Image: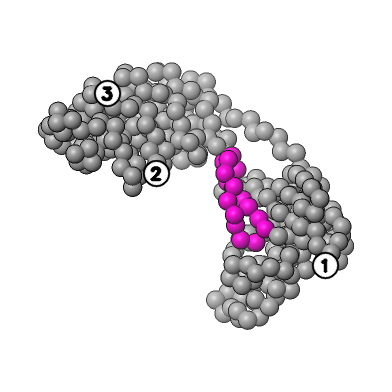
Amino acid sequence: MSKQLVSAAEVGNLDKVSALLAAGADVNWIGKSGAGRSALSEAALNDHVDVVRLLVATGADLNWRDRGMGMTPLGWACDSGHLEIARVLIEAGADLDLPTPKFLLSPLICAASSGHEDVVRLLLDAGADIHALTADGRNALVCAEKNRHNAIVALLKERGAVHPVPAEEVLIPWPDVGDDFSLADYSKPESVLRAFILSMNRWEIDASKQGDAVDWDKTRAEYASAFAPYCTPKQRVYGGGGSFGFPPKYEPEESLTSVTVKGARAELTTVQRKDRPMRYENIYVMLKKGGKWLVDSKKDRSIGLKEWKNTLL
């Protein structure tokens, strides 16, 4: 019955929603599979204002964040441009600034990004935080500018929005490893990592020049020559790789931000150059084998996110 309530709210069947609630359906029921949206979120997303009013009056959770995107009902209304639903939720006491857990997208940022000027105005009039930032440091103004919503840009500036000042990154200079990487010092993990990154960058560029006529045997052999001198000799996914892309995954502009050494294990953190559309920071785990530091594994995450994920070297 509660599952039917969510389905009825999704399609806007007010009579069925009313009957299911009267029969005892749980207004805040969430399924174990799928996007994990509540009946209120489904109604808000699909612009069923009368259903939203009924669910709110019945005690629906105004601030439930679904499993899929982590959006609240107000977030969905603002992202979709449903002005009247946003108004109903705000007047009922929905949290104006509750963001998605992962990317920190507030209702205002969603509305500004999607170009809904009337919703942006409603949120600002209600007191939404104009300075709220996404996980990667963007505010509503930056998002509106990126998507060329000029009227929203003007409105946000009129209300006091300014560009956020990014935190200054402290970078550690890379050691010189020479043009042929012969100066790599295996007693220093940062020197080995620098040689590895440059070696892989050169291999990726050379491999991409083959175009569609890739000689895979030759490419994999060259990969092994570029990879093996700087990495631990263990079995890896794809049996040693040979997969490349362009632009290269490894780039000379990747900057070193920290070096932590504990015994025979080291973690080196790097960050990609600032002009990349999607910017990542990396953790390289290095192990000392036979007196030499070698790259063993790698994790990465998009700038601003909390969770690291394992990735292929």
Q: Name the amino acid type tagged 1.
A: Asp
Name the element at disc 3: loop
Residue drawn at (58%, 51%) of the image: 309
State if disc 1 and disc 2 touch (CB < 8 Å). no
Indicate the position of residue 22 as horizontal and vertical percent values.
Answer: 14, 28
Task: State the count of labels.
Answer: 3
Q: Name the amino acid type tagged 3.
A: Gly
Q: Name the amino acid type tagged 2.
A: Gly
Quarter of the image where one finds residue 135? top right
In the shown orientation, is residue 49 left or right of residue 234? left
Q: Is residue 298 magenta?
A: yes
Whichever of callouts 2 and 1 sits on the residue coming sooner in the sequence is 2
State if disc 2 and disc 3 touch (CB < 8 Å). no
Whichever of callouts 3 and 2 sits on the residue coming sooner in the sequence is 3
Name the element at disc 2: loop
The residue beneath circle 3 is 59
The disc at residue 68 is 2
| Residue 71 in the image: above or below residue 281 | above
The residue beneath circle 1 is 180
Measured in 3D between alpha carbons, the distance from the residue under mark 3 to the one under mark 2, in whole angstroms, is: 23 Å
What is the quadrant of the C terminus in the image?
Answer: bottom right
Check disc 1: other Cα within 10 Å, few if <14, some if 14-19, many if 20+.
Answer: few
Check disc 3: other Cα within 10 Å, few if <14, some if 14-19, many if 20+.
Answer: few
